[in-house]
Image (cartoon, rainbow, N blue to C red):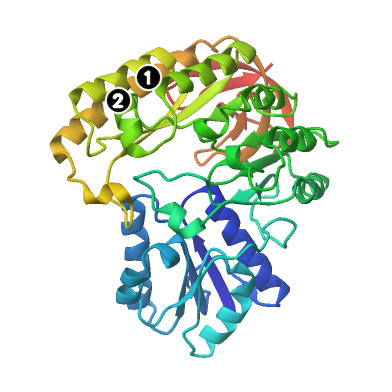
């Protein structure tokens, strides 16, 4: 029997796919690199946005039409968020919920033999120090906790991932140490909200970052998304942790809207003023910080004044990376009961913010032209050359280097998405 795993969505979901692969390999089930070779196909779904939902729904339907002799298993967030739709589009599909990954081999074996097996529901099972299979030995993802403490009105992911479940620092550090010893040069600490880490166990994110960053070896640590409300009482400690030499000078701090009214209606749990205070502290302590943020364009209660507040916020804060999403209803989300704003208004606002986003990023990158940077080479470019990351986690294109090494480069060119360089 041969299995192909097709994962969608975030870094956390990608790691779930690696865990399923590890469970299968431990049980002597072969993994293959293409659908054509497989007897069983696992579609590891993401459900955070409507376009991704549409993509995974189409994939599940298409697999059943094009490969009627192959077995299809659905895993990931869709299993817990929208079982009704899943039952409709794949009545003969087996399911593996995000908290049931340790049962992957049983589900695969049973499904291959003609059974329909559905393993769902929440669990406190740890996702650290478990077997993983990855096609990238240089970048190692560690899930530090699952679930969140939020109640965001627009979010459906929390229904799949459940309440906060933090994993012990000692286990996370052990996995990081083993990964580095096995050749990993970038450790990605990921979660639905890394800032929530330890709030259920009494441990602290800042302590975790410092312990990983103080391991022996040449590597970098990237810290994943942090909800602003969950670092309000720990800003100074997290800044000190990010300032560790082996940690990228990078934070992902979503704001979603520049309007206090909309933030309140989104149930975000913090104000614009608090967000600005956090950003100001980070930037004053880490001058070369790369700040990434998320914006939801066209939340149902967003009027022209609210949108203008978002424009002013972005022009004031000037985040280096801005992830824009047009608002769309999500299954079970509180905001889905509200009437959406006209699509043409949303499209116009999104286009306006996209132009601001490109200008800010290109201006930021142009300031680096002529500078010398020590970069970590982490992957091959899709159009040739190699992709490296600066200490501020900015992508740099470079030729004729070795993967997994640190090199000194001179920045020669800038675009709104990356830098070009030559060896210094």
Relative to 25, residue 106 above or below = below
> Of tags 1 and 2, which is closer to the observer?
1
- In the displayed structure, does residue 36 sit left or right of residue 144? left
Q: Position of residue 121 (x, y in %)?
A: 52, 69
Does the image show residue 223?
yes
Q: Which residue in the structure is indicated by mark 2? A: 353
- Quarter holding the C terminus? top right
Q: Residues within 10 Å of mark 2 (few under 14, many from 20)?
A: many
Residue 52 vs 250, above or below: the answer is below
Residue 251 picture location, percent across and down: 56, 28
Q: Nearer the viewer, residue 302 or 201?
A: 201
Side (left or right) of 150 relative to 424: left
Q: Which quadrant of the rendered structure holds the N terminus? A: bottom right
Q: Is residue 89 left or right of residue 47?
A: left
**Which residue does the numbered mark 1 point to in the structure image?**
314
Question: Which residue is rendered at x = 55% and y = 86% of the image?
Answer: 110
Horizontal side of residue 305 vs 153, given as left or right: left
- The mark tally for this picture is 2
Name the residue: 31% across, 36% down.
Answer: 265
**What kind of element bears circle 2?**
helix
> Residue at horizontal 25%, vertical 20%?
308
From what the image shows, is residue 284 above or below residue 65? above
Q: Are marks 1 and 2 in contact (CB under 8 Å)?
A: yes
Residue 406, image x and y in percent?
A: 73, 28
- Depth check: 119 or 37 in front? 119
Q: Which mark is residue 36?
A: none
Could you tell me residue 26's position as x and y percent? 72, 72
Q: Secondary structure at mark 1?
A: helix
Mark 1 and mark 2: Cα distance apart in space = 9 Å
């Amino acid at each position: 029997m041969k299995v192909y795993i097709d994962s969608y969505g975030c870094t956390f979901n990608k790691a779930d796919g690696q865990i399923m692969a590890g469970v299968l390999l431990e049980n002597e089930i072969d993994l293959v690199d293409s659908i054509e070779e497989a007897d069983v196909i696992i579609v590891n779904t993401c459900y955070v946005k409507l376009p991704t939902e549409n993509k995974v729904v189409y994939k599940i339907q298409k697999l059943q039409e094009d490969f009627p002799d192959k077995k299809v298993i659905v895993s990931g967030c869709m299993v817990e968020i929208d079982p009704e739709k899943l039952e409709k589009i794949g009545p003969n599909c087996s399911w593996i919920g995000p908290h049931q990954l340790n049962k992957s081999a049983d589900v695969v074996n049973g499904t291959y033999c003609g059974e329909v097996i559905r393993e769902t529901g929440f669990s406190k099972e740890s996702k650290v120090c478990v077997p993983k299979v990855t096609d990238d030995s240089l970048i190692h993802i560690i899930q530090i906790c699952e679930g969140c403490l939020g109640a965001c009105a627009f979010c459906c992911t929390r229904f799949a991932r459940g309440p906060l479940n933090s994993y012990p620092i000692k286990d996370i550090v052990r996995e990081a140490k083993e990964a580095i010893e096995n050749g990993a040069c970038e450790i990605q600490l990921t979660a639905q909200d890394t800032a929530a880490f330890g709030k259920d166990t009494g441990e602290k994110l800042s302590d975790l970052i410092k312990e990983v960053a103080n391991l022996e070896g040449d590597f970098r640590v990237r810290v994943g998304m942090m909800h602003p409300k969950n670092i309000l009482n720990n800003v100074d400690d997290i800044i000190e942790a990010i300032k560790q030499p082996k940690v990228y000078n990078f934070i992902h701090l979503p704001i979603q809207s520049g309007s206090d009214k909309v933030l309140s209606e989104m149930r975000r749990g913090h104000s614009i003023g608090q967000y600005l205070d956090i950003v100001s502290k980070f930037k004053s302590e880490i001058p070369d910080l790369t700040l990434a943020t998320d914006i939801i364009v066209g939340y149902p209660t967003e009027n022209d004044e609210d949108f203008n507040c978002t424009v002013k916020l972005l022009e004031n804060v000037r985040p280096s990376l801005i992830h824009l999403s047009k608002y769309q209803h999500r299954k079970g989300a509180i905001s889905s009961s509200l009437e959406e704003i006209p699509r043409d208004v949303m499209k116009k606002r999104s286009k306006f913010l996209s132009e601001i986003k490109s200008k800010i990023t290109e201006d930021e990158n142009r300031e680096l032209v002529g500078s010398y940077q020590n970069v970590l080479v982490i992957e091959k470019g899709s159009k040739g050359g190699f992709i490296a990351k600066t200490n501020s986690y900015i992508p740099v294109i470079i030729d004729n280097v070795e993967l997994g090494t640190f090199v000194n480069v001179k920045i020669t060119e800038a675009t709104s998405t990356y830098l070009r360089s030559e060896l210094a």
